[in-house]
Amino acid sequence: MPSTPEVSVVIPTFARPALVTRAVRSALAQTVTDIEVIVVVDGPDEATGKALAEIGDPRLRVVELPGKGGAPNARNTGVREALAPWTALLDDDDEWLPTKLAVQLELARSATVRSPIIASRLVNRTPRAQFVMPRRLPEPGEPICEYLTLRRGLFHGDGFIQTSTIMAPTELLRRVPFTVGLRRQQELDWTVRAISHPDVELLIAAEPLVLWHQDEDRPRISLSSPWEAQLEWLRGIRPLITPRAYAAITMSIISSMAAPTRSFRVFRLLLAEARRHGRPGVVDYLTFLQIWLLPPQLRHRVRDLILGRGRSGGRARADDPVAVGGSGADIAFPVDTATEQRAGTAEIGADVRR
């Protein structure tokens, strides 16, 4: 491997040797071969060490941390170890398609700023179906915080960014590290803080380049994650986002976590928070009410009925103008909201995406 590779790949993991070896092999199979793959093992983990040693590729490096520090800390550690000018992030339970880095490096050449973030669409794969996300790309002049958080419908979001799609200058990832201790919204938090710098912009490749595996039988953090901590996080980034985005996060993401409390006090608190510091729209109010008033199972059934998912089984419809197909599989844009139901990664070793 050359002393200075073109791209460093950082993969945090813990106690999932089969999954991380799959992720590593997808990185090593890239058409861009001038890379290094840095696996950061989040604490003593003999089984993972043995599995990675069997790969036998000199481009692979393993960094074992002395104790568990969480996914953001492991990513930051890997970025500090990176030798390349670009660093690409990959979660241990995801895979890259072979041209992922090549497409992103080509897109980076079109950037007009010094530190572009290069992301991509992905294939969201579940045992029931698979969908391409995000539904659309940012529009010219659209604030990225609004693209990632605002809804255009009650039961789905349009914008989305996921860790395994991100490639960015290594210098930027060191300048703006991931927030250690943040359990939810890690990608949103990092992206909002990064694009607040004047030399940064977000570019998203139109084609899906990542397989995002969401195995429904794996452990995951539920939507009842402590909403108080998320509200504290949101208040901390308020200067970096628009009032519309602030209202959307409060009335959708945080409300989804708080609604299981069935507390009228919490209902009033979040509504007042969104109105005081945000600028809610009609869709925000309707989303807020359906989250609080409808039990989750009923809400999901209503969503499926309205969007026709129950009839189509989650598969692409022939009359869907944005559906794409490949390799005999039906792939369609998602009907679930990217912000409410797929709220980002948390602790290493648990599938926390929902």
Image (cartoon, rainbow, N blue to C red):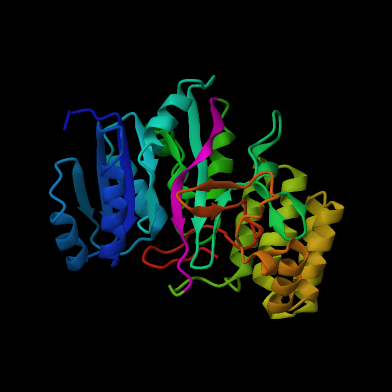
Q: Position of residue 82 (x, y in %)?
A: 28, 38
In magenta stretch: residue 264: no
The residue located at (74%, 61%) in the rendering is 307
Closer to the camera in the image, 280 or 350: 350
Q: Quadrant of the C terminus?
A: bottom right
The residue located at (27%, 64%) in the rendering is 18
Q: In this view, does 80 lie above or below 342?
A: above
Q: Residue furthest toward the right?
A: 282
Q: Can residue 168 be seen in this view?
A: yes
Q: Is residue 235 above or below residue 190?
A: below
The residue located at (71%, 34%) in the rendering is 142
Q: Is the magenta stretch mostly helix, strand or loop?
A: strand
Q: Quadrant of residue 335?
A: bottom right
Q: In this view, does 322 lie to the left or right of 22?
A: right
Closer to the camera in the image, 73 or 93: 93
Q: Give the range drawn in magenta.
A: 199-216
Q: Quadrant of the N terminus?
A: top left
Q: Can residue 77 be seen in this view?
A: no
Q: Is residue 235 above or below residue 324?
A: below
Q: Where is residue 281 in the image (x, y as percent from the top left)?
A: 84, 51
Q: Is residue 344 left or right of residue 60?
A: right
Q: In which quarter of the image is residue 100?
A: top left
Q: In which quarter of the image is residue 264?
A: bottom right
Q: Where is residue 12 in the image (x, y as percent from the top left)?
A: 33, 54
Q: Position of residue 336 (x, y in %)?
A: 65, 60
Q: In this view, does 170 lie to the left or right of 340?
A: left
Q: How many labels does the image show?
A: 0
In magenta stretch: residue 205: yes
Q: Is residue 311 above or below residue 318?
A: below
Closer to the camera in the image, 207 or 153: 207
Closer to the camera in the image, 214 or 256: 214
